Image (cartoon, helix red, strand yellow):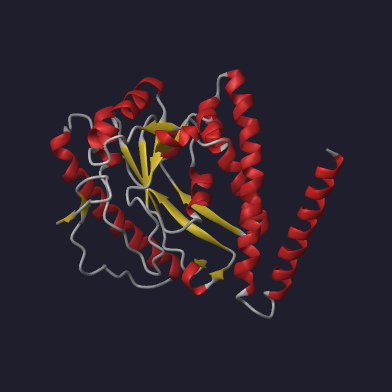
Amino acid sequence: MAGFISYVEVLGAAYLALTLAFYALSLRIPAAGFAARLLASYAALLIASAYGVVVSICFRVVGYHRSGQWATGRCFKYVMQLTTGVTFKIEDPHDYLNTIRPAVFVGNHQTELDVLMLGCIFPRFCSVAAKSSLKKIPFLGWFMSLSGTVFIDRTNPNNARSAMEGAAKEVSSQRQSVFMFPEGTRSYSKEPMLLPFKKGAFHLAVQAGVPIVPVVAANYSDILYVKGFMFKSGVIPLKVLKPIETKGLTTADVEDLTRDTRNLMLKEITELTARHRGQPMKIPSGETGGVVKASGAEATITS
């Protein structure tokens, strides 16, 4: 055991020295800052994950396990701010994050840095949604189960409605909010944009009868641009939009709801980015309000 601890200490010291070396090198070579903050981010994620396991177990014992991801996210937020100088500034004048519960929160998905965005905005009694198959993965699945993750059964990947039935019951009965990225994957875009939306989050909201709360972050390619190996410190603006009520809606309304929410979010992202960069607002051209027809790999885009 003592030998293992010594090995971990040496490995940790070497990792720290390498990270600091890249930070020092970035004073002359800006690209080195990408490597430095990348290494610091992985270390922050490891620290937050270890903290998350412990705090989720403790919360579970006292009956507050559905706040486990909130606590873990806040830990990641502060460690990232300390080690990389990156954080998100939240604009939520009506305090929707803390007063609307349960709800389905939806956000734009740009890069891996969106994990930090979740850490900054996660309200109490909120979790991510995840495939039920992830329960079986050691450590990750255990943490997700301990911290109150809402699991989605995607046995039939082409039927978004049936996949959300169990999750909708849990959201309603446990008053558990959920955060989802309806784009389904990261865009890595240099300019404000949205990929076509999948409809799962909107089926979930309609079936559970809870509001949709859009959360939009400005395009932050000026802080992190993976394709250009650029990663700088900075503050990224984020805005919580007015909740969209779903009571009285049915499955037949989901496609319109998805399209309208996407159009609203795209408009707000464009305005927020322009304000962040001190530029005049530009309206993206060629947008058709695309909606993904199904949640499976064979999804198609419709206007």
Q: Residue at x 23, y 34 (%)?
A: 161
Residue 269 percent across, percent down from the top left: 35, 59
Residue 172 lies, with reference to residue 245, above or below; the image says above
Answer yes or no: is residue 254 visible: yes
Residue 133 percent across, percent down from the top left: 42, 35
In this image, 12 relative to 88: left or right?
right
Residue 203 lies, with reference to residue 217, above or below; the image says above
Question: Which is nearer the eye, 297 or 228?
Answer: 297
Farthest bottom residue in view: 28
In this image, 130 relative to 48: left or right?
left
Quarter of image, res 31: bottom right
Residue 41 percent across, percent down from the top left: 61, 56
Quarter of image, res 175: top left
Q: Residue at x 13, y 37 (%)?
A: 252
Q: Residue at x 74, y 65 (%)?
A: 18
Q: Residue at x 32, y 26 (%)?
A: 166
Label count reads 0
Task: Quadrant for the N terminus, please.
Answer: top right
In this image, 213 relative to 135: left or right?
left
Question: Which is nearer the eye, 296 or 115?
Answer: 296
Residue 172 lies, with reference to residue 114, above or below; the image says above
Residue 192 percent across, percent down from the top left: 35, 65
Answer yes or no: is residue 100 visible: no
Question: Which is nearer the eye, 29 or 245?
Answer: 29
Task: Quadrant for the C terminus, please.
Answer: bottom left
In this image, 90 relative to 42: left or right?
left
